[in-house]
Image: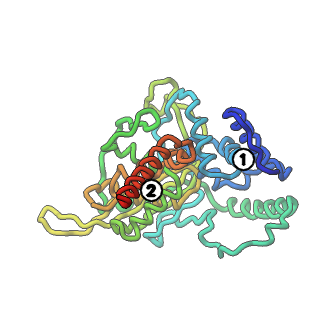
Amino acid sequence: MGYVAVKGGTNAIEASIQRLKYERLKGKEVIEVETILKTMRQLVDQVMSEASLYSPYLAALAIKQAEGSMEEAVFLLRAHRSTLPRLYYSQTVNTEAMFVERRISASFKDIPGGQILGATHDYTHRLLDFDLAAETKADIEKWTNQWMEEIKEIESHGELKHFPKVVDYLREEGLFPTYPLNNENPDDVTKKSLAFPASRSERLQILTRGQTGAVTSLGYASLRGYGQVHPNVGEVRVGDVPIYVASSNENTEAKDDEYYIGDVKLTEVESFVPVTTKNERNEMELNFEIGYGICYGQNETKAIAMSILDQCLENQDNPFSTHDEEFVLYHIDSVESTGFISHLKLPHYVTFQSKLDSVRNVKKGRAEDEKA
C-alpha cells in the first residue's frame, strides 16, 4: 500500500490512525491478551513497574495495543491509572511476610533458610532454543503435568515458611545500625509535583517508576566509575506480599481493623555499600550503608540498580552526576523522557523558519561586505 496524502489536519490524523491499525492487523493473526499474560510475564512485570499500576491483565492489554512497544505500553497504562479513583491507601507492607519464590545472597554462601534459586535466566546458557519454534500445546501440557507431579512429591516432604531478612542477622551482631521506625506518611509524587530537595520517599517512588533501561544505565555508570559505588548484594528476594487496607478511609495500623485484598509480586533488593567514615576517635574505619530497591514483578536488574542509585542519592556531596538527585530523577522517567524527545516530531515551523531567516541574513550581509 503506497502513501496517500490526505489534506486537512483532522482527516490526516484519522487516516494515520487507520494506517496504524492496518499495520497491526495486516498479518491477520490474533494474539490474545491471555497469551501475552501467560507467556511474557517479565515484559508484563516491567510495564507494571514503570506505569506504577499493579494490574497484569491491563499491562498485557497495553502491550497488545502498543504492538510490543515498551514506552507506548507504559504511557497507555499510566494514562489509564490517572483516571482511576483512589478509594483507600493500603497499610504499610511488611516484606518479611513475603511468600518467597526466589531468594539469594551474593554476600554470604550460607544464609538462614538457604539460598532459593527459583525461576531465573541467570544459570541458562543464553543459546537460542530452536525447539521452541516447533513447540505445541500438547508438548507444553505434557511437560508441565510431569513437572507438577515432581513438585508435589518434593513439597510433601517440606513445609512452607517465611524467611527473615539477611540484614537482620547483621544488625543482631551490631554490624549495622538499628533505626527507630518512621511512621510519617510518605510523600506521593503522583499527587504533588516533585520539588528539590526531594525526600527519600519521593526518590524511591521515582526510582521504582523509572525506565528500566535508564535506571540500569545510571546504576552501571556509578558502578563502573562515576562515584565507584561497588555494593555487595546482601539479598535479592522475589515473591508475593499480602496487601491489607483499613476498614474505613482512615489509614489506621490496627491489625484487627484491616482487610486482606490480595497479593502483589515484588522484587526486593538490599545492597551493602562499603564506605569509609570517621569514628569517635577521629580515625578512619570501614562501615556499610544499605541501598534499597523494590519494584513490581520480577525485575532483579532494575531493583539492584535502584539500590545503587538510592545509596548514591543519600550521599549527594559526591560531585558525580549519579549523586545529583535532580539529574537522576528528571532523566529516568519513561513518559517524561520519551514524551519530551517525541515532541520534536511536532511542528516547529515558526522557530525553525526564524533561525533560517537569521542564517540567510548573516550570509547575505557577509556576501554584500565581500562585494564592497
Residue located at (80% from left, 51% from top) = 2
Apparent side of residue 195 relative to residue 51 in the rendered image (left or right): left
Provide the residue designation for mark 2.
Answer: 306
The part of the image, by quadrant, that contains residue 322 is bottom left
Rendered-image quadrant of the C terminus: bottom left
User: Visible in this render: residue 111?
Assistant: yes
Front position among marks 1 and 2 = 1
- Amino acid at pointer 2: Met
Mark carried by residue 64: 1
The spot of residue 106 in percent (x, y) is 47, 69
Q: Nearer the viewer, residue 344 or 99?
A: 344
Identify whether 296 is placed above or below 304. Answer: above
Between 212 and 145, the one nearer to me in the picture: 212
Q: Quadrant of residue 188?
A: top left
The span from disc 1 to disc 2 (Cα, nearest Å) is 28 Å
What label sits on residue 243 in the rendered view? none
Q: The disc labelled 1 sits on which kind of residue? A: Lys
Q: Residue 240 location in percent, x, y? A: 58, 49
**Secondary structure at numbered mark 2:** helix
- In this rendered view, identify the residue nearer to me: 9 or 98: 9
Q: Please report the residue visible at 49 percent of the width from the left and 45 percent of the height from the top.
A: 353
Residue 281 screen position, x and y as percent: 11, 65
Mark earlier in primary sequence (1, 2): 1
| Number of marks in the rendered image | 2
Task: In this rendered view, identify the residue nearer to me: 250 or 148.
Answer: 250
